[in-house]
Image: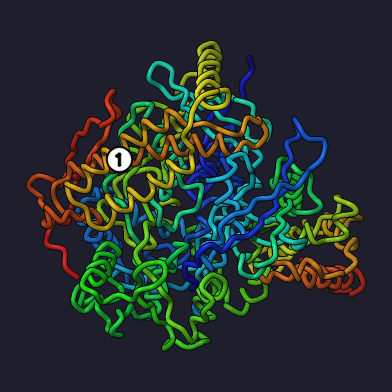
Amino acid sequence: MDFESYDVLVVGGGLAGIRAAIAVVETNPRLKVGMVSKVYPMRSHTVSAEGGAAAVLRPEDSYETHAFDTIKGSDYLADQDVVEAFVREAPIEVIQMEHWGCPWSRDPDGKISVRPFGGMTTWRTCFAADKTGFHMLHTVFQTSLKYRQIHRHDEAFVTKLLVEDGRCVGVVAIDMRSGRFDAITAKAVILATGGLGRVYAFTTNGNICTGDGMALAYRAGVGLKDMEMVQFHPTGLPFTGILITEAVRGEGGYLLNKDGERFLKRYVPNKMELGPRDIISRAMVTEFEEGRGFEGPHGRYMHLDVRHLGEAAIDRKLPFMRELGREFVGIDIVHDPIPVRPVQHYMMGGVDADISGVTPMPGLYAAGECANVGLNGGNRLGSNSLSECLVFGAATGRMAAEYVNVAQAVGANPIDAMLKDETKRIEMDYLDKKSGDESIGAIREEMQLDMDAGAGVFRTREGLEKLTKQLGNLRDRFGRIKIQDSSRTFNTELMAALELDYMLEVAEVITYSALAREESRGAHARRDFPERDDEKFLKHTIALHANEIAPRLEYRDVRITNFKPQARAY
Amino acid sequence: MGGQVAEKRITVRATRFDPAKDSAPRLQSYDIPFSDESMVVLDALNYIKAHVDGSLSYRWSCRMGICGSCGMTVNGTPKLTCSAFLRDYWPGSVTVTPLNNFPIVRDLVVDMEDFMHKLKSIKPWIIRKQEMPLGAGEHRQTMDQIDDFRQLSQCINCMLCYAACPVYGLDDKFLGPAAIALSRRYNLDSRDEGTKERLPVLASSDGIWECSFVGECSVVCPKGVDPAKAIQQTKLDTTMRFVLPFGNRD
């Protein structure tokens, strides 16, 4: 049988994936790159990033400060050599995006503007109004169209990594349009599939953020790192979970409780609204619990107030926020405060990868949110993730381009058998299955609500243990699902079932990793272990797939270079 | 913000079409709870898919009007279903059909490959005679220069303009509103020198001159891009390029 075959195959068409694909062909124009994405690339969730991308561009700023801010923000769980390399590359990548046409907002002298952001000690967040991710994604996607070497498989869903003798040699993907199962082979595979927010009920993440790449790697035997570190953004719109950018606070917005008080003075007195996300989210939940939140039809909330900034500044710097307020809440943020509450937003954890995206499996690489390269530790600073996608997308693409020069060609025979096995698995377990009485929708909703309750802003042993049982039960029920849709044409129910399978997998990894980390660090706040414990837990959690439901957990020391762990106060 | 409303229901009709089984699209009717004033048409579809009929197919992701996936025809008008509120239709019913002017792949999913080719054909990337090295830093660009193309850069490729365009409905060779607006977005970017390279496609028989200036594209655009204006201005610029002695700028 013939297969589509590439030198490098990128899974995922968001900012990290496209940046990686371009880096491959810029490194070696003779290489053939495939890009498989379950949506058209410009639909990728990068579009929803709003506030900006951090980079040291100003003479008054320094690499050392950006590194320190990131490391302190991570609650010292970041690998410091990775952070130090990242801060040096970020400005180069921001300039590269500028050369590719990104409409960065500018200062009067025509240079790229910067704005303040949470946890950053100085202004270093570059932005394109408040649609930075949207503009970056469209810029890099449209730029990618000029490279003939990049061949896209749009709307194809990856069900399995092809592994031969311990080496990743491609994927099996379902072409959504035809329902055909394809083996797509490559000497190197880069996972850039984004986050997993949809394991939670209340999330800023789009429908497509289902942890696919993490689950694929985990099942192939690659570890997932620090999966207990889930970021809750302080300001999501109640009901929808739509993100209200941190730039609202960066530009001077106030966060107010129901007494009209800037309550952050009790939590982050020196930073106030520009404190890091984990601490502000905890502050909000604490205020709610102490009765100082507003009560609304969709739960408790706070006010985010920008009225004092004035219409001109809002329209210049936060036009999308005004649009979102009008469209989705029926308010004008020029005249009305915005209702907000903490919302799942980002996954610090991810596929165990190093500074060049190299995973423990030969031929397999990972970049962007689906990877954990050691940059974000326990808490990512706002505006570091767009820069992360660029820096590590590019580094991973370059590394993969080097690897394929020495990698052996992929043989066809075992691939043929693997494709047949995988096709049979999906047909038997899903498409042609006759029995079953459980619905995908019901299991997914329960999982999401259970995750909100058990693995949210604050955790306890009791809550996490309960969650492991709930997830185990949902896993059993998943074995009894029935797919109503038997069509091979654009079968979104099949896709939803496969996504749910991935989500149950990563939800369990989150829960067991969180249960084992008996301390509070960054976004992982245990009520039963409120203090950070450097003695025991200045370490990465590595979760490995095991035969039983619970993963096998290993620990790896954090790499410390120049910044000795100290108390984290703002 | 809305609140819980007891027992309110709404009828949603959606197009069903599976090319393997159906000779033509048909409408299927669902009666579902309208449980919250904040519900949008997309929430209704998601309710149907999760609780009533798992086989209904449609595209969606961000549900905040920026990914461009969820464009459909709602009661005859092209809309982003994530931003179309049920309360604006209730107590009437809602009929959701695929975007007009595109082949239907399945149910509410249309084939947009044609646009993907057109997008590429207008070379939507910065073209320069001489690339500036990264070490030289950024191109200087003022906010006024960004204002020249800002509005055009807001296009989310949602295809509502193509669904509304009567010219595209008659002849799908027409380059169409979004592709022309995006080519102008690059032509007007002070960093770009590719206007001449984009001209053959724009000025071809399927380019700007096909537009009969109905303006429906700008009416339905959810992002205020105003492609109709972009097309008219491109026509003007293209004419000037030929008639003025020094109009042939790059």
Type of amino acid at the residue the image marks with label 1 = Gln
* Observer-nearest of A489 and A10: A489
- Residue depicted at x 39% and y 46%: A446
Residue shown at 19% from the left, 43% from the top:
A515
| Image mark 1: chain | A
Check the picture and name the quadrant holding the C terminus of chain A.
Answer: bottom left
Q: Residue at x 64, y 26 (%)?
A: A180
* Residue farthest toward the top in the current orientation of the protein: A413
In the picture, residue A472 is in which quadrant? Answer: top left
Is residue A431 visible in this depiction of the protein?
yes
Q: Which residue is disc 1 drawn over?
A: A470
Q: Quadrant of residue B204?
A: bottom right
Figure check: B81 above or below A114: above
| Res A108 visible | no
State which quadrant residue A4 falls in. top right
Total residue callouts: 1
